[in-house]
Image (tube, rainbow, N blue to C red):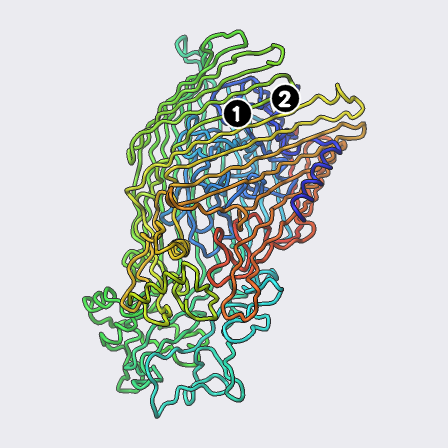
Amino acid sequence: MKTVTWLAMAIAGLMLLSGSALAQPPAADADDDQAVEETTVQSSILGDAIGEPVIDEIVITGSRIRRDAYSDSLPLTVITNEQALLSGLDNVSEILQGSALASGVQIDNTFTGFVVSGGPGASTFGLRNLDAGRTLVLLNGRRFTAAGTRGQVSNVDLSSIPFIAVQRIEVLKDGASSVYGADAVAGVVNIITRRRFDDFIVEVDWQDDADYGAVSMLWGQTFDRGYIDFALETSKFGPVKRFEREFSTCSERQLTNGELHPSLFAPTAGRCFGSINGYADVYGIARTPISLIPDNSGNLFGLGIPWRQATYGPDGGRIVETGFRDDRNWVDEDLLPQRELVQLYSDGLLDLDLGDVLGAASATYEFYFSRREDVFGGVHRQFFPFVHPNNPTNPFGVVGGVARPIVMSYDMLDPDTHVENDVTALNLGFDGDRGDFSWDVNVGYSWSRGGWSYDSWLKDKVARSLSSGVAPDGSLQCVFDPLQMYYASGSGFEDAVLSRILSEGLDPSCVPLDLFNARAIRGGVDRSAADYISEIQHLETDYDLLTATFNLEGRLFDMPAGEARGVLGLEWRSRELDDRPSMASVNDNQWGFTGAGRTQGDDRVSEVYGEVELPLLGGRPWVEELTLNTSYRWTDYSSYGDDTTWRALLNYAPNTTFRLRASLGTSFRAPAIYELFLANQTGFASASIDPCNNYRDPASDIDSGSERFKNCARLEEQGVIPPGYAATSSVNVITGGNLDLKAETSKSKTVGLVVTPDLADYIPVLGVDLSLAFDYYDIDLNNSISRLGAGTVLSRCYSSANFTAPECALIGDRTQSGDLSFVNSSFVNVAVEGSRGFDISLRTDREFGFGDLSFDVLATRVLGYEYGLTGDSDPFQYIGHHAYPKWRGEADLRFDWRDYTLTWSMDYVGSTDEEPVYELFSDRSVTNLHKADGTLYHTLSARFVDPNGRFVLVAGIINLLDDEPPRVGWAAWGPSATAPVNFNIPIGAGYDYLGRRLFASVSYSFTGP
């Protein structure tokens, strides 16, 4: 459905009448109709039974100043536990990543097999198209530890927060570094938990797909001088295998005319793209008496070994490629991984009397624990080492030359990856009031302990096992032949591997490996040989966060329009990261896997901040309210140095109907620990990403007038690459930290209009309450820290005139054969990065004699997100590309009648479109399928609450129309310039992988209201 159509439906629905589904927090006064503009919090599914206490003063996200009610002074969205459950959502990551607030690539569980910040299984959230490192996540207004595995740990893992303990999620859509410190560049997510209640509640959640189920328990007790709360939650999800969804059965190179790309030499007849089956490549010249010409079955004469996975026609004819994706991966590979979670939460308060000096006070604590266990069903890998002709298993012998068997690892290597992550946090605090001032002191310590294990081949043992000879009894045995081992070392001819073997000498436990027999070609070898060349690798990652804060807040002086209030605060933080890969990884001894060193570093932060709010005018004609809020923060990082940030907020309400709000401020983000200290990680990319690979081949469709063609021709003229160059080796990709990084700085501005007319006064017959909010934002970042992918670096360099792009400095010299030596994909400061757009939220509601009807809409429109390495370079525009749609939206239509609630929720992801890519080997003027249409998801649900408020049942259907995610075709140089694509689906882009499914949530209160 087109964007305009969807918005028209939303506006028409709004005019029906309706009211908020996302909800105003319970802490607000019941008679305060100046609620947060995008939501009106209603009691949660458990809140009906719990009953929330009235709080005299509150602190809203975005300010540290206490006030007696929520206001419209900040662009704040509030999402309640209740609304999430009515939409079939019961975890924090799904709530945020599936909302209209999510823009840009969001790291979620669709990133199976990808290297991401936080490691496999991490879930993060970023506002305003910026990555998660620019959105600060708080828990009850306090920082929470980053979590994950591998070296790139810096962001909060949303899956570590128990949902049953969540009362609401407040999302500030404005920069707030001067209020909360670094990282609050795009905004703040503040997760507020339930507290202070007397009840014991059990909840069970279920879905009829992905083997999902969850059991939760919530207990609370209040007493004369305080309270104590406790929550426990456990859940299991998946796995979901590729074959269980039609759209993920195989990767396709679909063209815009609806056909599939003619793969290499002949049409694929609808088969999957990708060559994986077993065969043997021959290097060298073949002479008699052995013929290396395939027969009509594709086997080499006299050898019975498939050659290059190709067959000839009955009369010789044309080669027909048969190297399509293998069906065993189709069965074994995960679309979504298996996950098990166990989460604990507890908090409490005890009132104290600290005497005449400090007065009444309270001691508080909060404790969190989460264990996440993920199993990723991975791809069965190819195994393709070089085998020297001296090896008796090489059927081509010395006349055939070096051979390279291309075999699958079905019985050789466990493809699964196992991840465990424990997150623990403890906060202890004191707070109190004395006269006109309140104070609080808090010390928090939180830590993450992650583990990651997987099976890998060892380079040195592969080399030893492929150095073979014939024993006296005719059997195969290992021999200490440096030449054979040199050819078989790693990806071939690795001096470091051979040197290590020679220094260690003979290995009596060596088991010879034969990769040319029929069993090996089909993906299996003797168990003893498989065990010898492989080893389980274990990686451990520790992240620690220690914080201490002090706040003093209160009345400064009186002004004609009210009290001037202020805050003075101190904050200190210590963060430490220690990522310890296996020794095989440190020594770069893993065959076909990346190598990595130990990443270890720490940082200390000291801050002083203040905030003042001045009611300039109020209660006058055309000036119902005019308020100025200013905040300032000084920050000193031990790793970088000091800097300051500030923000000014102006609120003007000429009357009770209209309100204008505007902010201007700066933000600051020092490099994360891993961005500074990440030990070099080596990986490799396919040779096909070389821009000069077969660049003169007419089938490549490379325009001879393009800068890419000219640059490659220039290299050929200079003798850097040979005539008819075809890349033959993988490209080494280096990723590491950068101690020369500068801190990010940014300036953001927002302008908003809030309209809350009292329609009952103007048109009493309607009886409709209406609220409209419009907010424009503009964020400009300087020295933004980022990492460019190897393909992006090469593309931007070779597309520039005479290699003038700044990305060219990240590319190493070419080797003697013309191949690329390396691409540096480490962290750099980006000169140009900016995001701008606007949000529209509209809500209406009407009370009928028989029930209440409400309708909410939140729509986001991104006007631009630019990214450029230098100030002189043309920035790349992300908007409109995959994962960066121009529009996202959500709407909720809700009807409450007695003990029943009916809800219809809609979520919209706008269309995206990549640049057309003309396919290789195509003789038709059709391009790769590069457009993803907009997708509108529907969810229906019903809720019943028994009259006593003890039993609550919610049931519904998610993705009512069973909409599949849009598919795009794989292009020759990659499917997307902005987002990873897996199984032809842009991932991290907000699409639903599971399809139509039933859900239910049942809770029971043993105590009752």
Mark 1 and mark 2 residues within 8 Å of each other at the beta carbon = no
* x and y percentages locating residue 568 in the rendered image: 40, 18
| Residue type marked 2 | Phe
Q: How many marks?
A: 2
Which residue is under mark 2?
Answer: 658
Res. 303 image quadrant: bottom left
Q: Amino acid at mark 1?
A: Ala
Give the quadrant of residue 194. top right
How crowded is the residue under tag 1: few (<14 C-alpha within 10 Å), some, or many (20+)? many
Residue at image point 46% right, 14% down: 554
Q: Visible in this render: residue 513?
A: yes
Is 462 located above or below residue 398 in the figure?
A: above
| Residue 859 x %, y % | 61, 38
> What residue occupies the far bottom of the structure in this picture?
289
Residue 315 versus residue 858: which sits nearer the camera?
315
Q: Secondary structure at mark 2?
A: strand
User: As displayed, is residue 124 above or below residue 921?
Assistant: above
Q: Is residue 414 left or right of residue 994?
A: left
Disc 1/disc 2 C-alpha distance (Å): 14 Å
Q: Is residue 255 left or right of residue 113?
A: right
Q: Residue 662 has which mark?
A: 1
* Quarter of the figure with the C terminus: top right
